[in-house]
């Protein structure tokens, strides 16, 4: 489903992603883990056609990304790490917009929007402008929106960030259901390692732009001689704290997120 | 097709939902119309130009369209800052369709704005000469709107944030307006200003409006129509190209 070979991205001399290669099989749940600033989101931006790689090859659903952008976009869905809602529209309008641009037929669209809004408990506030929502509500809406069309491949960039354990659990059950019922391939990042431990069939750990280890949970634990993913993660990436590289835009977004 | 429609609808909802924005964008044309119209009216009359409001109103309509169109085009910058742009850019819709939806949306908003200013100017004493020509005048408004929305989108595709906005305002939008014949006749001007005005696309928009509303075109309606059409097509192509290169 995803094939990445020697992927590299440089920003004015700074190498964010450094010669990364991995592949994700169809129907697999794949966790992409790493400390802040390791290159996770940059990699996802390249995989989802938002950013052009400096070098390397990406194939999604058999299509080479540099040549068949439109086919690639038809194959995947994504729930972004940072906000991506239109604040001036209502919750329902945001859902409807997504359903329409993803070409979900009207009847199915209406059904799924209702189901999903009920699922994230926003149905009775569907006609309110999103700018009046709290951070958690916006996040739930984003998750619901990302699930309206059922893509072959779903990217989740820290989907459960800022949500309470009940909601996280609830959302993961839904995603796993999609994976089992529809064979949807899931590619996700998270800082909640317990989530990765429970859901992921395969795990890759990235740090300083390089993949430092990949395999099944069992393989990672054996390789590092540890008992849990958390310990394995710390033994691979060390215990120092990281800063995230951010441009003015990211600062803006950060600011925006903090305020909401 | 549906994607273009939903993008178009979004532009309209965003514009007409914000009452502050609506009123704010009507304040400026109204001020220009009243202050300049009544301020310069007597001098214009004495110089043998006739009724200045009749002359000025098409220019002010064009001005309000210019501003609204460029701003709605530049809304992409906000979409980028608040993250919504990503949502549209990863969708399985070609960039050309996204650009088309946004351009049509922005152009519709700007045209409606122009029509509102047209009615406001009637309150200030403006009277169109031929009612039958009104549909043609509205068509001209739509063309001006398309052209400048495409310009706004092209500019916005090159910018990361709003910091360059004053630059755009003072070096592109204001000169386009002041050197277009919106405020004064283009005949008998110093050579340099005349040349600038004749390469300014807004001049042809203003002229077209003046031609259809008060029968005062100096280039001729055919020329206005051709020039606007060609420049609009070129700007839409440039805009689509720049928009397709956006990275978020």
Image: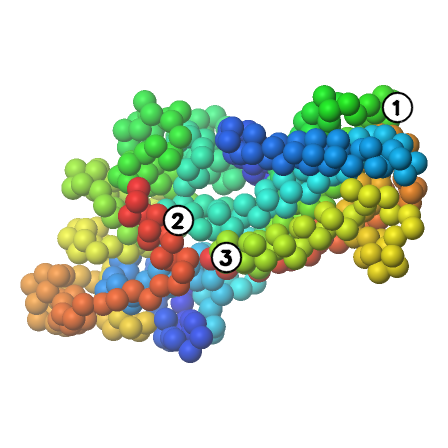
Q: CA distance from mark 1 to mark 3?
A: 45 Å
Report x, y in % for residue A245: 33, 66
Which residue: 38% across, 42% down? A146
Q: Quadrant of the C terminus of chain A?
A: top left
Residue A1, placed above or below residue B134: below
At mark 3, the secondary structure is: helix
> Which residue carries the number 3 mark?
B163
Q: Secondary structure at mark 1?
A: loop
Specify the subunit that label 1 lies on: B
Asked if one can make out residue B94 in the rendered structure from this viewpoint, the answer is no
Q: Residue at x 89, y 35 (%)?
A: B46
Q: Is the Cβ of the residue at disc 1 closer than 8 Å to that at disc 2?
A: no
Q: In the rendered image of this protein, does residue A208 appear above or below residue A153?
A: below
Q: Is residue A185 left or right of residue B211?
A: left
Question: Disc 1 designates what residue?
Answer: B130
Residue A242, quarter of the rendered image = bottom left
Can you identify the residue that label 2 sits on?
A78
- Coloring basis for residues: rainbow
Compare residues A59 and B47 and report the one nearer the observer: B47
Asked if A217 appears above or below A110 in the picture, the reply is below
Residue B88 drawn at (x, y percent): 50, 46
Sort mark 2 into few (<14), some (14-19) or many (20+) by Cα contacts within 10 Å: many
Tell me the mark number nearer the camera, choosing from 3 and 2.
3
């Amino acid at each position: 489903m995803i094939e990445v070979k020697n992927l590299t991205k440089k920003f004015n001399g700074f190498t964010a992603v450094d010669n990364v290669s991995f592949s994700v099989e169809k129907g697999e749940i794949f966790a992409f883990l790493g400390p802040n600033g390791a290159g996770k989101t940059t990699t996802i931006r390249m995989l989802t056609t938002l950013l052009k790689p400096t070098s390397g090859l990406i194939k999604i659903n058999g299509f080479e990304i540099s040549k068949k952008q439109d086919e690639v976009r038809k194959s995947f869905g994504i729930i972004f790490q940072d906000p991506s809602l239109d604040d001036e529209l209502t919750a329902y309008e945001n859902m409807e917009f997504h359903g329409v641009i993803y070409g979900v037929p009207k009847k199915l669209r209406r059904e799924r929007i209702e189901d999903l809004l009920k699922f994230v408990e926003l149905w009775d506030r569907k006609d309110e402008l999103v700018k009046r929502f709290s951070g958690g509500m916006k996040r739930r809406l984003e998750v619901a929106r990302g699930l309206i069309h059922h893509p072959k491949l779903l990217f989740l960039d820290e989907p459960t960030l800022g949500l309470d354990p009940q909601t996280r659990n609830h959302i993961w059950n839904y995603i796993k259901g999609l994976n089992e019922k529809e064979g949807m391939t899931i590619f996700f990042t998270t800082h909640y390692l317990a989530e990765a431990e429970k859901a992921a069939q395969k795990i890759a750990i990235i740090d300083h732009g390089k993949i430092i280890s990949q395999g099944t949970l069992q393989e990672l634990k054996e390789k590092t001689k540890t008992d849990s993913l958390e310990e394995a993660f710390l033994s691979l990436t060390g215990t120092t704290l990281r800063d995230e590289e951010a441009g003015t835009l990211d600062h803006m977004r950060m600011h925006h997120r903090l305020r909401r | 097709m549906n994607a273009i429609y939903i993008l178009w609808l979004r532009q309209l909802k965003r514009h007409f939902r914000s009452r502050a924005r609506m009123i704010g964008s009507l304040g400026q044309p109204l001020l220009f119309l009243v202050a300049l119209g009544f301020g310069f009216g007597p001098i214009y009359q004495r110089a043998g130009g006739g009724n200045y409001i009749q002359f000025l109103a098409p220019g002010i309509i064009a001005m309000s369209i210019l501003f609204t169109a460029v701003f709605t085009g530049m809304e992409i910058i906000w979409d980028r800052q608040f993250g919504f742009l990503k949502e549209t850019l990863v969708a399985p819709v070609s960039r050309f369709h996204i650009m088309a939806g946004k351009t049509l949306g922005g152009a519709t908003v700007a045209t409606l704005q122009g029509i509102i200013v047209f009615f406001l100017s009637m309150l200030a004493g403006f009277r169109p000469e031929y009612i039958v020509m009104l549909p043609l005048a509205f068509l001209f408004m739509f063309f001006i709107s398309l052209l400048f929305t495409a310009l706004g989108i092209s500019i916005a595709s090159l910018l990361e944030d709003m910091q360059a906005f004053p630059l755009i305002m003072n070096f592109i939008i204001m000169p386009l307006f002041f050197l277009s014949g919106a405020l004064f006749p283009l005949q008998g001007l110093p050579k340099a200003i005349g040349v600038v005005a004749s390469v300014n696309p807004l001049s042809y928009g203003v002229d077209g409006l003046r031609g259809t509303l008060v029968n005062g075109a100096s280039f001729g309606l055919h020329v206005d129509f051709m020039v606007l059409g060609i420049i609009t097509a070129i700007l839409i192509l440039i805009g689509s190209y720049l928009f397709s290169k956006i990275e978020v």
